[in-house]
């Protein structure tokens, strides 16, 4: 019996040994299964000389035998704007790449485009050819290149006008010197790199027009998917204590940390910042932040920021036909009132504060915030806050409200937080339609004429 068991164990061991030693063979069949995880890699706008992010795809061997790829080749070779890395090795052509059964390898792709004379975005194309067992398959590559004016820690030391012929890419930061004016032409696009601040010690005049092609855009320089919509992608615009006579119109300030910060009073009778028909969106900190300063805002949308409008330490503020709204989404959680006003700053300094809000909306989604207007007076200085013909959610019992609508949904056209789609135009049944106060404001954020009895908010309803 013992002998029989010993023989059985010996036979089993020998069988296991031969199975373990048996080499997995390669399939050379033209019918072998190979596929890639994607058939096209697309790079959105890539600024010349800067380079893109790195994307990747997989090559799968879906067979029970090894597969030898005879060649993986970048069609454009060494002159291509694209660069590839196959399974850890960099080059333009790779031979005899082995993939184990039911396994895969990575291919990484990036693009660096040289400057040229094009002012408009231009398309660059190439492909990666994969050869195996007499078969060929391709992964297509394309990228839109964009020439730009590149500024690295630049200073505006004389009155300067930026043309809209090419976008501007700000690396490190930009400073407008005291007493100097930077004028930005309509239709100009300004892209700022991570960590960059536009600091205005002098004057900024960025006045666009109502058409998409003539609006002025301030935003981050990462335009590839996912990164293009991230808040805190750049620092924002700072108007310092010495800055005067600033104007923004038909402008958008997107994806910043603190989008617009305005410090200290103006040295003359003009507001330090006059902002009209403009959008501030998706800031990880404050959208519009006034610190003992003066701001006149008309037909502005401040949306989906951690602190949409924040006013501290005093100053003089006037808002007319503005929509200030916030909804939790894939990037930010709405957990602060959309309007915060306090008479002290972080250093406990306090000055007189006057703020008037007319024909404006202050609203956010249900959940963490019940009062969308927070008014905090701690000092003995003037604290005069007035709301007229506004729609708001909450109580704000220490303010003066006239002809206002409390705790009614403004009924915006589209609020789709899951897909990050927000349209703050009004539905026809919105309580904001035809409930505003007639003022000198004759148009809305779209540049459309307002009715004799205007709507509340930045948009006038149009059938």
Image (cartoon, rainbow, N blue to C red):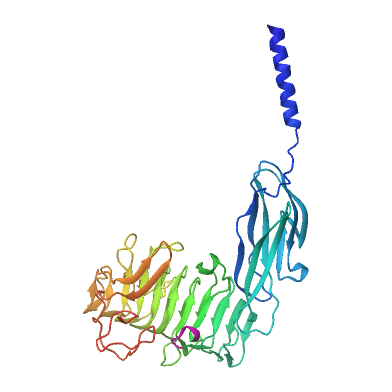
Q: Nearer the viewer, residue 117 or 215?
A: 117
Q: Looking at the magenta stretch, what is its main secondary structure?
A: loop
| Magenta segment boundaries in residue numbering | 209-213
Rendered position, 195 above or below 190: above
Q: Nearer the viewer, residue 329 or 204?
A: 329
Give the residue drawn at x 41%, y 93%: 269
Q: Which residue lies furthest to the left in this view?
A: 403
Residue 210: say if magenta: yes
Residue 78 falls in which quadrant of the image?
bottom right
The quadrant of the rendering that contains the N terminus is top right
Residue 66 placed where, x, y %? 71, 44
Residue 17 falls in which quadrant of the image?
top right
Give the residue drawn at x 65%, y 67%: 141
Residue 327 placed where, x, y %? 38, 66
Q: Nearer the viewer, residue 24 or 345?
A: 24
Q: In this view, does 357 lie to the left or right of 66?
A: left
The quadrant of the rendering that contains the C terminus is bottom left
Residue 131 placed where, x, y %? 73, 56
**Can you see residue 422?**
yes
Give the residue drawn at x 68%, y 85%: 117
Q: In this view, does 427 lie to the left or right of 349?
A: left
**Can you see residue 376?**
no
Q: Is residue 145 left or right of residue 3?
A: left
Q: Residue furthest top?
A: 1
Counting the numbered discs, the total is 0
Residue 181 placed where, x, y %? 55, 91
Residue 307 falls in which quadrant of the image?
bottom left
Q: Is residue 99 left or right of residue 444?
A: right
């Amino acid at each position: 019996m013992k002998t029989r068991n010993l023989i059985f164990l010996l036979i089993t061991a020998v069988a296991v040994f031969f199975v373990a030693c048996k080499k997995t063979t390669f399939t050379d069949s033209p019918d072998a299964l190979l596929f890639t995880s994607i058939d096209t890699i697309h790079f959105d706008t890539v600024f010349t000389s800067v380079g893109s992010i790195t994307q990747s795809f997989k090559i799968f061997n879906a067979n029970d035998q090894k597969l030898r790829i005879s060649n993986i080749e970048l069609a454009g070779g060494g002159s291509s704007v694209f660069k590839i890395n196959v399974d850890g090795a960099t080059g333009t052509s790779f031979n005899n790449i082995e993939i184990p059964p039911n396994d895969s390898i990575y291919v990484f792709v990036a693009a660096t485009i040289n400057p040229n004379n094009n002012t408009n975005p231009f398309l660059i194309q190439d492909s990666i050819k994969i050869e195996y067992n007499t078969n060929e398959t391709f992964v297509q590559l394309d990228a839109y290149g964009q020439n730009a004016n590149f500024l690295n820690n630049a200073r505006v030391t004389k009155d300067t006008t930026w043309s809209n012929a090419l976008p501007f890419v700000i690396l490190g930061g930009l400073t407008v010197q005291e007493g100097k004016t930077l004028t930005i032409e309509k239709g100009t696009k300004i892209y700022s790199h991570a960590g960059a601040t536009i600091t205005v010690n002098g004057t900024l005049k960025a006045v666009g027009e109502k058409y998409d092609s003539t609006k002025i855009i301030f935003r981050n320089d990462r335009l590839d998917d996912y990164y293009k919509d991230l808040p805190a992608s750049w620092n924002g615009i700072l108007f310092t204590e010495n800055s005067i006579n600033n104007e923004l119109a038909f402008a958008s300030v997107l994806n910043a940390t603190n989008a617009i910060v305005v410090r200290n009073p103006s040295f003359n009778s003009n507001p330090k910042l006059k902002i009209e028909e403009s959008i501030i969106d998706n800031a990880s900190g404050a959208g519009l932040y006034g610190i003992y300063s003066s701001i006149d805002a008309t037909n502005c949308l401040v949306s989906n920021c951690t602190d949409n409008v924040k006013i501290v330490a005093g100053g003089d503020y006037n808002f007319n036909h503005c929509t200030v709204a916030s909804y939790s989404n894939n990037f930010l959680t709405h957990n602060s009132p959309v309007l915060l006003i306090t008479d002290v700053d972080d250093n406990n300094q306090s000055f007189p504060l006057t703020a008037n809000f007319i024909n404006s909306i202050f609203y956010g989604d249900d959940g963490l915030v019940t009062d969308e207007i927070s008014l905090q007076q701690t000092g003995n200085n003037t604290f005069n806050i007035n709301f007229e013909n506004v729609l708001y959610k909450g109580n704000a019992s220490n303010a003066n409200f006239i002809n206002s609508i409390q705790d009614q949904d403004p009924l915006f056209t589209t609020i789709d937080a899951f897909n990050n789609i927000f349209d703050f135009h009004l539905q026809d049944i919105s309580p904001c339609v035809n409930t505003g106060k007639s003022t000198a404001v004759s148009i809305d954020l779209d540049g459309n004429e307002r009715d004799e009895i205007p709507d509340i908010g930045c948009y006038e309803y149009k059938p």
